[in-house]
């Protein structure tokens, strides 16, 4: 009985951990797209719209680009990249 409870608790904890990590990764890719749009001189509204596009933000190229961008400019810290984007007007959804 105790084994079942421990396995169940581990499963629930794993689920919430992966859900949070997936959300943070999605926000990191969106922040990357937003920062690139701002760099290309788009308005804050346009950049937020561009970062909100679901099709491009899930592409492997966007994911790899976000990882590389975070590695080079933020020491690999996704949360720092997201915070910088938020300071520049990025809106999380």
Image (tube, rainbow, N blue to C red):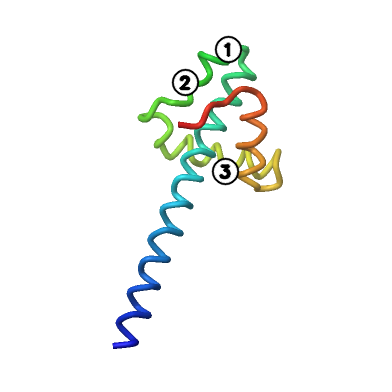
The 10 Å Cα crowd at callout 1, few under 14, some 14 to 19, many 20 or more, is some
> What x and y, as percent, mark residue 66?
55, 38
- Cα distance between the residues tagged 3 and 1: 22 Å
Point 35% across, 29% down: residue:
55
- In front of the other: 29 or 21: 21
The quadrant the N terminus occupies is bottom left
> What x and y, as percent, mark residue 72?
69, 41
Disc with the residue nearer the chain's start (1 vs 2): 1
Point 44% across, 49% down: residue:
22
Read off the residue under disc 1.
42
Relative to 6, does residue 68 appear above or below in the rendering? Answer: above
The answer to whether residue 53 is left or right of residue 88 is left
Q: Which mark is residue 67?
A: 3
Disc with the residue nearer the chain's start (2 vs 3): 2
- In front of the other: 60 or 30: 30
Disc with the residue nearer the chain's start (3 vs 1): 1
Q: Which mark is residue 27?
A: none
Under tag 1, what secondary structure?
Answer: loop
| Disc 1 and disc 2 in contact, CB within 8 angstroms | yes
- Cα distance between the residues tagged 2 and 3: 18 Å
> What x and y, as percent, mark residue 89?
61, 22
Under tag 2, what secondary structure?
Answer: helix
């Amino acid at each position: 009985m105790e084994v079942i409870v421990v396995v169940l608790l581990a499963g629930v904890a794993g689920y919430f951990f992966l859900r949070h990590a997936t959300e943070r990764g999605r926000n990191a890719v969106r922040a990357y797209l937003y920062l690139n749009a701002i760099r290309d001189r788009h308005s804050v509204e346009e950049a937020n719209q561009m970062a909100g596009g679901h099709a491009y933000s899930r592409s492997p190229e966007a994911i790899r680009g976000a990882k590389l961008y975070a590695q080079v400019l933020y020491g690999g810290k996704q949360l720092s990249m997201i915070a910088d984007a938020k300071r520049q007007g990025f809106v999380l959804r």
